Every structure is written in C-alpha cells, then in structure tokens.
C-alpha cells in the first residue's frame, strides 16, 4: 500500500492510516519510520496504537514538503502481544510529490537594463 503526500511546497500534510480489528482480542502496534527520508515524516500522536476487539482506530502520519524532489519512506506497524495474541506486521510506502509552488512574496525593484 502506498500513501501519497501531495501538495504545495512548504505545505504540511497529515494522512491517517485506518486500522480495523475484526478479532475478539485487543491488538496493539508500534510504528516506526524507516528509509531515506524517514526523518522528514512524523507520527504526531505517538508511535503506538491499541485497537480494542471489533473496533477501529487510526494512526496519523505528518509530512511537510520541504524539497522539490520526491521524499520516500516506509511506515512499519509491528504487532505487540496483547493477551497472548499477535497481529500481522503491516507496511506502507510513503511518497511525496510537489503539485504547485506558491510564492511567499514578491519584490519590486527598478534597475537599468543597459548602460553605455
């Protein structure tokens, strides 16, 4: 699964990874970010999530687009044993793309174009 962060340069984008627990046991996950640009992504609500039986929850992933080149990382959700039950390890590819560049401001200046 790929999660795409698209927007303008310097925009902060938050995506939610939706997790559902269909089992009758509580599931818990620890999230880690790995890869070339992993430091540019963050988990603002923390890196753990606990999902009660037959419920759902989500984990937020935040990214601020700082460069024109695409950023790439991998989100790995590793199951922690709760009540002796393990969930599957989940992985998500994170990619960014700059869609537009809005100027921060404009400067007016007057200068001769040619001088003898």
Image (cartoon, rainbow, N blue to C red):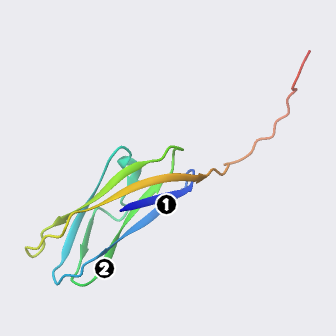
In space, the residues marked 2 and 1 are separated at their CA atoms by 22 Å
Q: Residue furthest right?
A: 116
Q: Which residue is mark 1?
A: 13
Please provide percent x and percent y for residue 104: 66, 49
Could you tell me which quadrant the C terminus lies in?
Answer: top right
Give me the disc on residue 62.
Answer: none
Q: Nearer the viewer, residue 1 or 75?
A: 1
How packed mark 1 is, by other alpha carbons closer than 10 Å (few <14, some 14-19, many 20 or more), is: some
Residue highlighted by disc 2: 56
Q: How many marks?
A: 2
Q: Which residue corresponds to the image point at 49% horizontal and 60% vertical from the top-left?
A: 13
Q: Earlier in the sequence, mark 2 or mark 1?
A: 1
Please say if the residues under marks 2 and 1 sit with CB atoms less than 8 Å apart. Answer: no
Q: Position of residue 73 (x, y in %)?
A: 36, 51
Residue at the left extreme of this rendering: 84
Query: In which quarter of the view is residue 53 placed?
Result: bottom left
Q: Secondary structure at mark 2?
A: strand
Give residue 40's position: percent from left, percent from top: 41, 49
* Mark 1 element type: strand
Q: Quadrant of the N terminus?
A: bottom left
Q: Identify the residue shown where x is 51% and y is 51%.
A: 65
Say left or right for 18 vs 102.
left
Q: Nearer the viewer, residue 49 or 1?
A: 1
For the point 88% across and 22% down, which residue is it? Answer: 114
Q: Is residue 81 left or right of residue 102?
A: left
- Crowd tier of the residue under label 2, counting other residues whose Cα lies within 10 Å: few below 14, some 14–19, many 20 or above: few
Question: Is 1 on the left or on the right of 112, as rendered?
Answer: left
Rendered location of residue 41, percent (x, y): 39, 53
Between residues 93 and 61, which one lies in front from this camera angle? 93
**Residue furthest out toward the top:** 116
């Amino acid at each position: 699964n790929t999660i795409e962060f698209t927007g303008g340069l310097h925009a902060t984008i938050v995506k939610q990874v939706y997790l559902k627990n269909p089992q009758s046991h509580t599931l818990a996950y620890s999230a880690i970010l790995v890869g070339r640009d992993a430091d540019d992504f963050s988990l603002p609500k923390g890196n753990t999530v606990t999902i009660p039986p037959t419920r759902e929850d989500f984990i937020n992933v935040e990214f601020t687009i700082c460069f024109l080149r695409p950023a790439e990382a991998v989100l790995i959700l590793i199951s922690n044993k709760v009540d002796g039950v393990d969930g599957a390890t989940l992985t998500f590819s994170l990619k960014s793309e700059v869609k537009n560049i809005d100027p921060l401001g404009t400067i007016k200046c007057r200068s001769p174009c040619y001088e003898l």
